[in-house]
Image: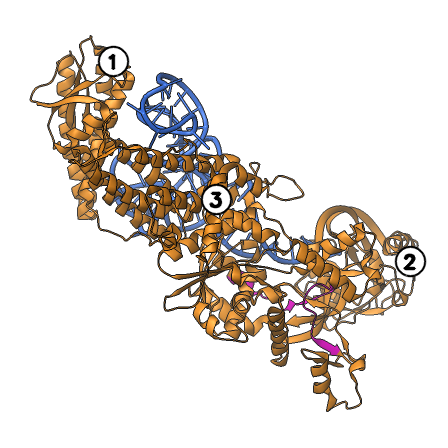
Amino acid sequence: MDIPNKYDPSLVEDKWYSYWLEHEMFKSVPDERESYTIVIPPPNVTGVLHMGHMLNNTIQDVLIRRARMLGYNACWVPGTDHASIATEAKVVQKLRKEGIKKSDLSREEFLSHAWEWKEKHGGIILDQLKKLGASCDWDRTRFTMDPKYSESVLDTFIDLFEKGKIYRGKRMINWDPAALTALSDEEVFYKEDPGKLYHVRYQIAGSEDEWLTIATTRPETILGDSAICIHPEDERYTHLHGKRAIVPMVKREIPIILDEYVDREFGTGCLKVTPAHDVNDNELGIKHNLEVIDIFNANGSLNEQAQFYIGEDRFDVRKKIENDLKEAGHLIKVEEHIHNVGYSERTNVPIEPRLSLQWFVDMKELSKPALDNVMNDRIRFYPEKFKNSYRNWMDNIKDWCISRQLWWGHQIPAFYFGEGENDFVVAKTKEEALAKIQEERPELELSDLKRDEDVMDTWFSSWLWPISVFDGFYKQDELDYYYPTKDLVTAPEIMFFWVARMIIAGYEYKGEKPFQNVYYTGIVRDKLGRKMSKSLGNSPDPIELMNEYGADGVRVGMLLTSPAGNDLPFDEKLCEQGRNFSNKIWNGLRLVKGWEVEEKKASPSAEFAIKWMKFRIAEALESINANYDKFRISEVLMSCYKLVWDDFCNWYLEMVKPKYGHSIDAKTLKTTIAIFEDLLKLIHPFMPFISEEIWHLLRTRNGANDALVLSNWPMQESYDKQVLSDFEKLNDVVSGIRKIRKEKNIPNKNELELKVKVNNEHKDEFDSVIAHLCNVSSIKKVDEKVEQAFSFISNNNEYFIPFSDDIDIEAEKEKLAKQLDYTNGLLKKINGKLSNDSFVNNAPEQVVAAERKKQDDAISKIKILEEKLASLS
RNA sequence: GGGAGAUUAGCUCAGCUGGUUCAGAGCACCUGCCUUACAAGCAGGGGGCCACUGGUUCGAAUCCAGUAUCUCCCACCA
């Protein structure tokens, strides 16, 4: 067979992915096995694959592939999220390019454009995941606006409403006065603006000439003031307690209230309260039961309530009122002041906090089990540190505003039949709504009902994901089998938006956690530490990366340096390392396939190699399994990497490899193939494509069921630590010889003789390996030192390589003196410890014993070194 | 402003409940090699006051306190 010396992923990856799909190897159907379920964090339906997805989905694929090999019924459910804000924004943008304004369309027309867009772009990201090798059960692909899914969202809304957990309430929202729309927090960005701090004096009611001075950045809102607030313990203002003040210009009398919210250090320590136009003021207003005076129109101009400047823009008014206050003697001073102002992402206009009627979920009671079951580790977070932020958030949880002033999404199932705040019915359809209200209001007809225009927050559908992907609200069989799911792999940014809420929904609707483990990935950053983003243009295209390095190479590159919760500073070099690793394994295959076979006795070197390698794998497997259990994926990968590259390729294969022109014995070859197969299993979760390819090239397979994807994870065998430590000793001798070759410039092809003065144990079985690896022709035991030889000490045995030329005695002496120094220092330290009574008395016995052993070893090593030194002079 | 976390080699990170000269790994670097699987490779090598200052202890990279610097999340400060 002719195998090229470079591995070419492009010839392999698509082939195996189609093969796996064709044989339905990722498909899961409930059976008698235990399930192992992962639900994908659904990417935005219109999204394209970015580096964050690469990381996240590679981890999921690693976990699910291993689970499959461990014999679980592995089920990875893929799908997409309708992402109302993002998608709607994209559709609006696309329509605008075509000259269509959203405001010119009816809801139905707009939605048909949106669906069209979704159908066109919706599948892209999922196809890209296939290229990555994601072993999802594609038959289960879900979309958060699938009919069944949507139904579950509406039912949940109705259910929570009926339980009294959903209510309508006034709340401050971010209003965009240019676009005339509410914005979500995500659509607001903050900018430091140079502004002014105006000090304005208010007269105390009932006084002749008593005043207090407030500081504000927004003097135009003075017209909407309904209180002055001071800190209850502020001694400067004790005399004002219980008094009232008069608002300049409008001459309204307002109370002076006390609240610890006030920062005494800021401004004058007096705060004016405008509940209609500031979030914090609004909270104060609710707390102190203040009047709400809304002085703005939707477009940011002033209305009648303001009494002055009616119809003029808020920023024009700010200038004018400064002047007018000054003339009236109210303006004390104006300072420069830099403050953070929220801007609309869409129109780049400062947002206006505005009160409006929204739908809320009352979170207090709902969130309790979700907090408890994370804190008590029934749901485990990796890394654990995120439990702290989680608790902090859950402890201070606020009610969840779930209405969004958008069209793309799940429309709120509330139907209004009048203008009153309570003139509505919550029901799944207009017909049901009518039926519900008819008893009370028999005169109403279908046409009298008007559905709420808003849609629900996207997260109000995604929080049902682990349940609704199995249609879990309507049938139990699949849900009972797959739920709770095993692992959730996601980014810490959405711990509150999504993870916490899924847990809440899980306990509320299933009385059970939605997943066992949550693995938080880090953020993928560029070399400069910046978050990768489209706007910065610093993100490589994952597809191009895969084309260049192979999907396996990129997968390895992503996972090499990304422990859970740590950011991943991405460097293409990592992918290169992944590609190189692919090639290394590939060449292992080339070597094994290139051997001529013969029935004969195995070489002693090969026998030792096999004995050692099996134990070495067992040892590595133990730590690999343990690290998987702790979700230390990068460590697992590194163990596999070293096991394959160092232990297998650099040591094992070199030890079993026949000499040039010789053949290998059949038994060693067979065993080598078996060992190779075990290693392929271990790397398969990380490098599914190349491992499957080699699996099939290594030997003939028995049909489709003999694919590596479906093979069994290696069994944990016991291992002999003695053999492993013997190998370390052998390894040290081999390195010693190689080092001398290097230092003395002895070409590899020159055969060497080796003489050993055994002071400590030297196993005979080492000899054949040493001879094989170091091109040593003979190994002889000697009783005396060998003159005219290069030498080194390993495990307190002395090794000599006789050489005819003169050796550099001074250099040898220097080397020995260095070693002697080091060993003397070591001994001194040990002696110090051992002569310290408190150490001997307090330290555990085995620590002391180990120390004694070290002492003995050091003493004999010093003796050997001193003798050698003496013999040289 | 509230909360969380970090600081170990040039880079990215291990170092679990203090105890092997505890200071490790991968990459990068340096030096030899185109040795008949692989130069996308092989072999060898250099490199660190474990942020700083104290404390606890027979013993501290590891535990405690303080200092400095950095990162993230939440809030959006009149």
Comparing A479 with B47, the one in front is A479
Write down the chain letter for disc 3. A
Query: Which residues, given as a range, are shown in magenta?
Result: A391-415
Callouts 1 and 3 in the same chain = yes
List the residue tagged with mark 2: A312
List the residue tagged with mark 1: A811
Callouts 2 and 3 in the same chain = yes
Q: Earlier in the sequence, mark 1 or mark 3?
A: 3
| Image-based side of A758 in relation to A142, left or right | left
| Image-based side of A135 in relation to A290, left or right | left
Whether label 1 touches label 3, CB < 8 Å: no
Marks 2 and 1, how far apart in space? Answer: 93 Å
User: Does residue A471 appear in the picture of this structure?
Assistant: yes
Q: How is the image coloured?
A: by chain
- Tag 1: residue type? Ala
- Helix, strand or loop at label 3? It is helix
Q: What mark, if any, has residue A274 been given in the picture? A: none
- Tag 3: residue type? Glu
Marks 1 and 3, how far apart in space? Answer: 55 Å
Q: Earlier in the sequence, mark 2 or mark 1?
A: 2
Q: Nearer the viewer, mark 1 or mark 3?
A: 3
- Tag 2: residue type? Glu
| Image-based side of A61 in relation to A864, left or right | right
- Helix, strand or loop at label 2? It is loop
Q: Which chain is orange?
A: A
- Give the quarter of the image for residue A276: bottom right
